[in-house]
Image (spheres, rainbow, N blue to C red):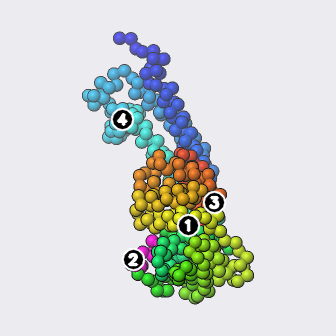
Amino acid sequence: MSRPSVWARIRQARLFRVLLVYLAASWLIVQVVNELDDALALPDWISPVTVILLLIGLVIVLATAWVQAQPGLAARAAVDEIPGSWELDLGDAGRSIARGKLPHLTWARATLGGVFAFSMLFGLAGLYVVVKDRGRSFAPAEAVAAVAPGIAIVPFSVTGEGLDVWREGMVDLLATSLDGAGGLRTIEGRTVLARWRERVPDGRVADVATSLEVARNAGASYAILGSAVGAGSQVRLATEIYDAASGRELGRAQVEGVPDSVLVLVDRLAVEVLRAILGSEAGQATPVHHLASITTASLPALRAYLEGEALFRRGDFAGAIAEYERAVTADSTFALAYYRLANSYGWAESIRSPLIAEPLARAIRHIDRVPPREAELIRADEAMNGGRLDGLQPLRRAAASG
């Protein structure tokens, strides 16, 4: 029986196909290493060592393909003379090494060797970073330098027909209006409400001490306590502003108007809150986000959005989807509602749900109507949903903003 030619062995081993697949995987690994290097300030040797390991791996992969294409290999594996193509058989490998022989090359052994080599590489690189600067490189430089003082808005007490939506809704609206103003940051509403539910049973009203504890547990420097009261055709919004650590009251604010002008009322309330925290003149001069320009001017859309937020926080993703759909039907430019709708589809189905793409694309289309931090999150989600690595940079900027 004649032995196959070298060219026949090359075709049988599919060396060209193996080479193309390996080069594609190597390119992806190099891109990931570059992104991690930029994000974490990895040591200078990480890139050259990665290339060396990939070159060694190329030799091993091609050699494995060549060995696995040998005639009669399947018959020898069937009688346990050698391991099968996807068999590790570490005992056999150990015995071969003990005899001074190279273990039989299998795809399982080649894959395990690659995983082990790169695990060691990244483990050593991570250890280097931690030892060098005690882990500071794992956070963006801006976030390490300083974290802006946080404001926690706790749920409002509400009195009056049709005002229940503002109990948690004011947490979202005031947080959106105040975020980033005067060098301050607002604590994410979901974080505040999670801490709130740990301390306050449903339907109960918390006293000042409990509200301040909630704010401190959420990581806030300042706490905003408030109420919404309906009286005839008017609604009155009132707040008390506290230093969360000392419990000292910094000031009070109150605005009043018709329910249809709630966004204007919240904007005015936000200015008064800033005056209490920053001082009268500085607070008056510091701009806040005008809610109608970054949320919606449609009250039905706003109500649906806030209902969706409350349902989302309780894990009712199907109900949240229905409310967010109502919101974007009422206002087709409501970028935040599109973004939350995409998030809800991700939780209700999976992060690879095809239903995510359209609301994310619409959120991107109207991204100029979104606060800066949420805009970065939308860009990151859109990039990652499209399988692109450029979503890491917006996440770093969002983290740096608090």
Magenta region: 193-203
Q: Are marks 1 and 4 in contact (CB under 8 Å)?
A: no
Quadrant in the picture for the N terminus: top left
Could you say where residue 111 lies in the image, as x and y percent from the top left?
43, 39
Residue found at the very far top of the displayed protein = 1
Per the image, label 2 sits on a secondary structure element best described as loop
Q: Are marks 4 and 3 in contact (CB under 8 Å)?
A: no
What is the CA distance from the residue labelled 3 to the residue labelled 2? 34 Å
Could you say where residue 125 lies in the image, as x and y percent from the top left?
55, 53
Residue that label 1 marks: 299
Local packing at callout 3 (Cα closer than 10 Å; few below 14, some 14-19, many 20+) is many
Which one is earlier in the sequence, the residue at label 1 or at label 2? 2
Residue 80 position (above or below residue 210): above
Residue that label 3 marks: 369
Residue that label 2 marks: 202
Of tags 1 and 4, which is closer to the observer? Answer: 1
Main SS class of the magenta portion in the image: helix
Q: Amino acid at mark 4?
A: Trp
Residue 215 lies within the magenta run: no
Q: Are marks 3 and 2 in contact (CB under 8 Å)?
A: no
Local packing at callout 2 (Cα closer than 10 Å; few below 14, some 14-19, many 20+) is few
Residue 195 lies within the magenta run: yes
Of tags 4 and 2, which is closer to the observer? Answer: 2
Quadrant in the picture for the C terminus: bottom right
Which one is earlier in the sequence, the residue at label 4 or at label 2? 4
Residue found at the very far front of the displayed protein = 233
What is the CA distance from the residue labelled 1 to the residue labelled 4? 62 Å
Mark on residue 86? 4
What is the CA distance from the residue labelled 1 to the residue labelled 2? 26 Å
